Image (spheres, coloured by chain):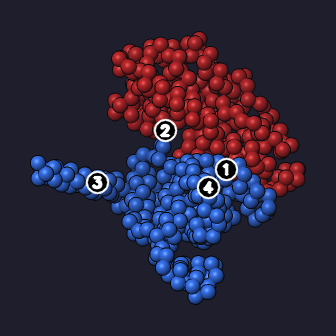
Chain colours: A blue, B red
Amino acid sequence: MRKIREALYRFSVITAAAIGAATLLLLAGWMLAAALPALRASGISFLMSPVWEPTRERFGISAMLLSSIGTALGAVAAASPAALCAALIFGEFCHPAVGRAFFALNRILSGLPSVLYGLIGMTCLVPVIDRKLYPLTAAAGGTGGLAVILILSLMVLPSLVTGYEQTLRAVPQAPQRASAALGATKAQTAFCCILPSIRRSVRLHAGNALRRALGEATAVLLVSGNVVRLPSLFAAQRTLAGTIVLEMGYAAGKHRSALFAIGLFLLLSTALLPSAQGEG
Amino acid sequence: MRRLVAAVLAFFFTACACGGERPLCVVGSSSMGKALRTLAAASPYPIEVQLGGTQQGLAALAEGRADLAACSRALTPADGEVEPTVLALDAIAVVVNDENPFTAIDSDVLRAVYEGEITDWNTLGCTLGRIVVIGRETGSGTRASFENAIGIRKPAHGQELGEDGIVCTAVSSCPRAIGYVSAACEAEGIHPLLLDGSAISQETVQSGTYPLVRPFLLCADGTDERAEAFLVWATGEEGRTLLRSIGLFEPQERQ
């Protein structure tokens, strides 16, 4: 009886794993097949050219690529220290009840749909940037790299906080007690004992956040201004993911294939980033 | 945005409500979405609406995947042999924020603004500051119609947005902005400009005095009787009344 059960479990686990792997392979293969016509037609200029004019079949993604990388890096650079500090303060320093309330609130935030962030950005953040920084962002009316970075950093913040919270909770207690016994204050313990020990995990969570920021489209579309040009903090620009959402609705032929090529590119770049899978 | 959600819901309900008989399949321009859904909801024939773009609609019709193609621009010889029926006329309104004192603009000035020759409202006689030129993304039918009618070759956009509703929101939150949307799109905090001295009305749109008008066409391949019956209904009194109620205009000749 037990043997049958074990064989059954074994079979279902292997089948599930095989289905998962096959789906992933099929997806990648299908995207590659869909992307090939555009890649073959544009060649290396697909990556190098900043000119994106689908109506004239000129597909160059470098401007959008730089914009995607710039805004995603900027957002994670801004959000990561803030998330780490928040996790430290609410996890280690303050009253446990306050900490629990904060993390509960944080989980709600991480469940908000991205279009909400975009709308908030469009109706609240962009006009404020426009007024305060006038005439820096004048031509774009407040949209541009700065608005995208701010909105993206808000969006990756909740998941970063959750990640760091779990990491901090998994840190062994013994070194901290030893540190306290040596007469170190709580802050000294946090900065000199806890933080160095979680360096690796910080990097992995930042990688996850980067992946999310790179793939985010709906919210970005509403605050980036979407004109294809080399990125700047104060002028409209377009990201890779944004382009897919903006143009997939009516793209046909080579144009559609070029959008798939962008998708393939995003898939590859996120696959290459470090992952926090299975880490505490 | 609320309108978008309502539209999506309406789409699903119409899609689910058509059981039994195979629904008539209309594929095409997303600008015509509201008009098509309004018709589909009241139509005596079950209708399925799929929105993508004018080009996709024509391709679907040619391949037999659609019974009718929805086109939001005039047909060209490259579009092949199809029988177009003018469903309605749509006007494109040039809109500015309510804080903007302008009430009228000429099409040459508009062209200069969109091509970046005029970059400041001060040049036009008011003290708002730098103009935020809002356009639509390449490939948008509204953008193609607008640029053709005004004669814009190389637009210098400050922003490119993906939907009429989003253009309205952007203009309503920026006093220096100027944008163009389908006249059927209404929003608070913005007002349309008189173009070359004429406002959008049934008369100016029909006679062509208002320069920014495009046809909403339904194209058939002449093989489907139910499609013909639907066209007769849609261009009849009931269809016309429905289309008028969502801000579209009647074409000149009646059938």
List the residue tagged with mark 3: A20
Label of residue A120 in the image: 1
Q: Is residue A197 left or right of residue A84?
A: left
Q: Nearer the viewer, mark 2 or mark 3?
A: 3
Residue B240 drawn above or below residue B131? above
Say if B210 sits above or below B44 in the image: below
- In front: label 2 or label 1: 1
Residue A163 screen position, x and y as percent: 50, 64
Q: Which residue is mark 4?
A: A101
Instruction: Look at 78% across and 31% down and name the residue there.
Output: B198
In whole angstroms, how far apart are the C-alphas of marks 4 and 2? 48 Å
| Direction from residue B223 to residue A165 in the image, left or right | right
Q: Which chain is disc 2 placed on?
A: B
Q: Earlier in the sequence, mark 3 or mark 1?
A: 3
Q: Are marks 3 and 4 in contact (CB under 8 Å)?
A: no
Counting residues from the start of the chain, the first of labels 1 and 4 encountered is: 4
Task: Give x and y (percent) for residue B125.
Answer: 88, 50
Q: Quadrant of the C terminus of chain B?
A: top right
Give amino acid for label 1. Answer: Ile
Q: Which residue is mark 2?
A: B53
Q: Amino acid at mark 3?
A: Gly
- In space, the residues marked 3 and 4 are separated at their CA atoms by 37 Å
Whole-Å distance between the Cαs marked 3 and 1? Answer: 37 Å
The quarter holding residue B60 reads: top left
Q: Viewed as shown, does residue A138 lie left or right of A108?
A: right
Residue at image location 85% in from the left, 52% down from the top: B128
Specify whether disc 2 shares its chain with disc 3: no
Query: For the point 50% across and 73% down, which residue is it?
Result: A202
Dot 4 alpha-carbon crowd within 10 angstroms: few under 14, some 14 to 19, many 20 or more: few
The reply to whether dot 3 and dot 1 touch (C-beta < 8 Å) is no
Residue type beneath disc 2: Gly
